Image (spheres, rainbow, N blue to C red):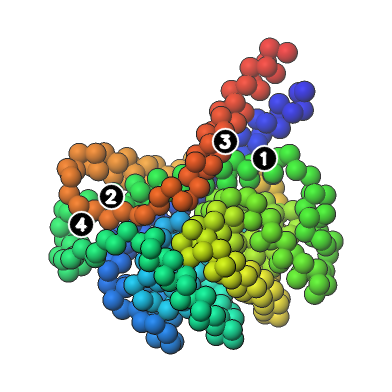
Amino acid sequence: MDGFLERWQSSAATSVGLFWTAFWAFALGYLISSMIQVFVTRSRMKKAMGRAGAGSVGLAAFFGFLSSSCSFAALSTTRSLFTKGAGLIPSLAFLLASTNLVVELGIVIAVFLSWQFVVGEYAGGLLLILCMWLLVRLRKPEGLIRKAREHARRKEHGHGDDDEPDWRTLIRSRTGWLRVARTYGMEWGMVWKDVTVGFTVAGIIATFIPPSFFRALFVGSGEGPLSFWHVVVQAVVGPVAAFFTFIGSMGNIPLAAVLFGNGVSFAGVMAFIFSDLVVFPVLRIHASYYGWKMALYILAVMLVSLVVTAVAMHYGFAAAGLLPDTDHVRSMTERTFFALDLTLVLNALFLIVTAGFLLWTRLGGNEMHHHHDHGDESGVGFLFVAAILALAWLAGGWLVPPLILSAG
């Protein structure tokens, strides 16, 4: 009993410590993302994207890079682009870029993993788009695309694009920065459940799950040099594991660090990170937008693309002598999270920014602002319950074990 209580306390402390380490990175990323979303509007994105070709795919990837990392928001925007006439390839390129090439994701990866994973995230994101493009071009199901577009148009709410002032005018106005503040709050509103569950699960796994479990799940992990088939199997297991986690890309990063610290290969971890678009809630949303046939087609394309990309990145980094080691993450449960250091200063700064934005949005009137179409289709109910349970676990871990252990 005492052993469980000590692990519970350690798990809660690890989860909170991991979030404390990353808070400034989340806040900085969401601030940058919010500014981009306000000053580079979606209506302009839609007008610039064509139906096919390298130009359209490049623009789609660029606009995805400028967009939000929230998978559910990206799904909604992708549907809107697709129903407005964008081709399937540019639409999927936008979806992949908006969940793999965004600024805040790279910042959080740098905090928890290493620069090699940051490079792998961005280079791999581009390779993902190229693989998807090739797969769809090899067998482009025109009939399926036509039916999916008709299905998606029936689901579209039909809102027109609002006229927006020039960004130079908007960036100098009170209204523009109030929109940034509101969008910043909405970014946190969209991801707090994923982040809460993700960090809690990472703490639990880091504390309770023995390394032998990861060696069994990711075949060959922790056993020295891996064969080609071990690398491929781990790249396949990564998305399979992610499929059942229900955690978004931002919440997956601390868990990815735990996996890497337990000997999972670079390919397996990158495949796990790339897998935020193959989890079950995303499959369900695709089915509601486009029908089940197109949803399964997109799932298959994404799975093949991310496995190929993860394996290619692994051997590309190996050939260049750039595969990362696990020194940064192995002792995650033994790290000192709370200290008088730069993290404390950055967190204090962004806590002030966050509090100021939240207060301003409450006092800022009823001016029009951008919003994400998150809707009921995003699995909010499940994630909300999971997040509440996670918060209860964390609170209990901080309060219950000390009381029982001290009484004993």
Count every numbered label the image shows and give the total. Answer: 4
Helix, strand or loop at label 1? It is: helix
Q: Which residue is mark 1?
A: 204
Kindly report the distance in space between the C-alpha atoms of the residues bearing marks 1 and 3. 10 Å
Asked if disc 1 and disc 3 are in contact, CB closer than 8 Å, the reply is no
Which is more toward the observer, 358 or 369?
369
| Left or right of 18, for residue 219 | right
Picture disc at residue 390: 3
Amino acid type, label 4: Gly
Kindly report the distance in space between the C-alpha atoms of the residues bearing marks 2 and 4. 9 Å
Helix, strand or loop at label 2? It is: helix
Q: Which residue is mark 2?
A: 181
Asked if 242 appears above or below 274 in the picture, the reply is above
Q: Which residue is mark 4?
A: 176
Kindly report the distance in space between the C-alpha atoms of the residues bearing marks 1 and 4. 41 Å
Amino acid type, label 3: Ala
Kindly report the distance in space between the C-alpha atoms of the residues bearing marks 2 and 3. 27 Å
Q: Nearer the viewer, mark 3 or mark 4?
A: 3
The x and y percentages for residue 293 are 57, 68
Picture disc at residue 397: none
Q: Earlier in the sequence, mark 3 or mark 4?
A: 4
Amino acid type, label 1: Ile
Asked if disc 2 and disc 4 are in contact, CB closer than 8 Å, the reply is no
Q: Residues within 10 Å of mark 2 (few under 14, many from 20)?
A: many
Amino acid type, label 2: Ala
Residue at the spot x=59%, y=26% of the render? 396
Q: Earlier in the sequence, mark 2 or mark 3?
A: 2
Which is more toward the observer, 93 or 76?
76
Q: Residues within 10 Å of mark 1 (few under 14, many from 20)?
A: many
